[in-house]
Image (cartoon, rainbow, N blue to C red):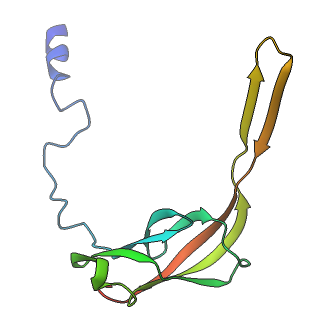
Amino acid sequence: MATLLASSTKGWHGSGASPVARDTRATRVKTVFAVIKTGGKQYKAAVNDTITVMTLPGEAGETLTFDNVLMIAGDGEPALGKAIAGSTSVSAEIVEQIRGPKVLSFKKRRRKNSKRKRGHRQGLTVVRITGISGAGA
């Protein structure tokens, strides 16, 4: 009897995995996204995404427009370069102005009785992407 129980727990039956393979292609939703550049960095942005970027001027609730769009993809072939230059923009709303985590800079010169400790918190802006307009959107 003990051997029967041991043999029945082997395989996929006890693992909880289903033997039926699912077709995930039918459930995928194509979303349009853009790659924007602000603050010297590039960010992937889709509608209703919340991203944290370097400090931008403005209060919470104000709207911004990012004109430096590097690429748009999602519907068919991605568009980039001269094809979207000047005709594409990403609109966003400022959620809040925050400060990042504290970064400590510690320097010590051994045997010299010399040390220095400094802290820094970077200013950041949290924005919610509200729309992507232009070529390929």
How many numbered badges does the structure rendering display?
A: 0
| Res 93 quadrant in image | bottom right
Of residue 106 and residue 103, the one placed in the foreground of this image is 106
Q: Left or right of 69: which side holds 4?
A: left
Quadrant housing the C terminus: bottom left
| Res 127 quadrant in image | bottom right
Percent coordinates x, y for residue 114 in the rendering: 84, 22
Quadrant housing the N terminus: top left
| Res 53 quadrant in image | bottom right
Percent coordinates x, y for residue 81 in the rendering: 30, 77
Q: Left or right of 71: which side holds 51?
A: right
Percent coordinates x, y for residue 62 in the rendering: 67, 84
Q: Left or right of 113: which side holds 45?
A: left
Q: Left or right of 58: which side holds 24?
A: left
Percent coordinates x, y for residue 79 in the rendering: 26, 78
Of residue 83 and residue 21, the one placed in the foreground of this image is 83
Whether residue 137 can be seen here: yes
Q: Against 60, is 12 above or below?
A: above
Q: Against 78, is 7 above or below?
A: above
Q: Against 59, is 6 above or below?
A: above
Whether residue 1 can be seen here: no
Of residue 87 and residue 130, the one placed in the foreground of this image is 87
| Residue appearing at x 81%, y 33% in the figure | 117
| Residue appearing at x 19%, y 43% in the figure | 18
> Looking at the image, which residue sits at the far right?
113
| Residue appearing at x 19%, y 59% in the figure | 24
| Residue appearing at x 74%, y 30% in the figure | 106
Of residue 85 and residue 100, the one placed in the foreground of this image is 85
